[in-house]
Image: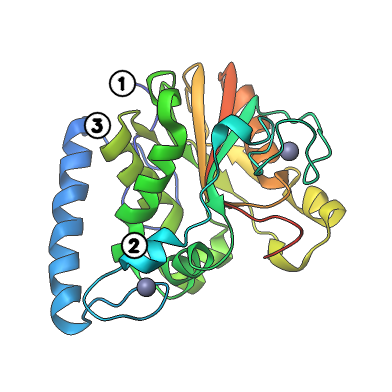
Amino acid sequence: MVSTGRITESARTPLTPKVPDVPFDFAVQDHAALRAAGSAIADLFWPQRCAGCDLPGTLLCDECRRNLALIDPAHACPRCGAPDGDHGCAECGCSEFTFAAARCAGVFEWPLSRMVTLHKDAGELRLTPLLARLAADAAGDWCAWADCVVVLPASPGAFARRGFDHGALLAAEFAHIAGPPALDALRARPRRDQRHLSRQGRNENADASIIACPGAHVPERVFLIDDVMTTGATAEAATGALLRAGAHEVRVLAVARACGGRL
Ligand SMILES: [Zn+2]
Ligand SMILES: [Zn+2]
């Protein structure tokens, strides 16, 4: 349990520095209860449909679950988490990153890409537990290593546009499933949307776009969690901020790995 730093706050609150004085366990139970209540109401008015094929009655049908392009960590690039990159990676070119390693649950292609998009851009927050479970499965033995999990913060513009922070919800659910407590330690400065930028543009845009919360005390071993990893530029910026705030090692964990510029 982490007793210092900022424990994750509600993903629906504004991104302003805040130091809640509630213990972590309380925050997690509170989150779980709120999520369960929210899901029950959503099920009543908006019946579940498969995120992959729209089949009614489920958030992910068996057929779409079988079609998930999950990444085997034994054969993935240890630096960027891309599939089949253990002996030379076409995605990162075996680049050295500031973060120590990365794992990604699956390739960013249908149906996982649609799950992520519905969660992030359509507000289908009932997918949060499914995405968090995929991240926890990908993390595997790393879960016993980490002191905490920190989310890549949404930009102020993205938060205002969506009205919720999908990443914070993902981190809280991951903490609930996998164990390492969620720590609210980073803030994002305004920046352009990453999705239409080149690799160089992403690096420049991400540089200095993420800062540690003033006064944040970050423990030594940190998971940095995100829904999609593309070039790793944003994770690099966040890792720099975490290292300056006290972390000794940062490992990146993403639900999906966008390969070959697919995003
Ligand atoms: Zn389906
Ligand atoms: Zn790689």
Is the CB atom of the residue marked by disc 2 within 8 angstroms of ligand 1's nearest atom? Answer: no
- Tell which of 133 and 222 is nearer to you: 133
Q: Amino acid at mark 2?
A: Leu
In space, the residues marked 2 and 1 are separated at their CA atoms by: 29 Å
The answer to which of marks 1 and 3 sits earlier in the sequence is 1
Please tell me in which quadrant of the rendered image residue 108 appears.
Answer: bottom right
Instruction: Check the image and report above or below for 71 versus 126.
Output: above
Q: Secondary structure at mark 2?
A: helix
Residue 228 percent location from the top left of the image: 57, 54
- Tell which of 258 and 119 is nearer to you: 258
- Tell which of 242 and 89 is nearer to you: 89
Q: Ligand 2 shows up in which quadrant of the image?
A: top right
In space, the residues marked 1 and 3 are separated at their CA atoms by: 8 Å
Q: How many marks?
A: 3
Q: Amino acid at mark 3?
A: Phe
Q: Secondary structure at mark 1?
A: loop
Query: Nearer the viewer's eye, disc 2 or disc 3?
Result: 2
How many residues crowd around disc 1 within 10 Å: few (fewer than 14), some, or many (20 or more)? few
According to the picture, the residue beneath numbered tag 3 turns out to be 24
Q: Amino acid at mark 1?
A: Ser
Q: Quadrant of the N terminus?
A: top left
How many residues crowd around disc 3 within 10 Å: few (fewer than 14), some, or many (20 or more)? some
According to the picture, the residue beneath numbered tag 1 turns out to be 3
Please tell me in which quadrant of the rendered image residue 35 appears.
Answer: bottom left
On screen, residue 36 versus residue 182, left or right, reads left
Residue 14 percent location from the top left of the image: 41, 58
Q: Secondary structure at mark 3?
A: helix
* Residues tagged 2 and 1 counted as in contact (Cβ below 8 A): no
Q: Quadrant of the C terminus?
A: bottom right
According to the picture, the residue beneath numbered tag 2 turns out to be 127
Please tell me in which quadrant of the rendered image residue 207 appears.
Answer: top right
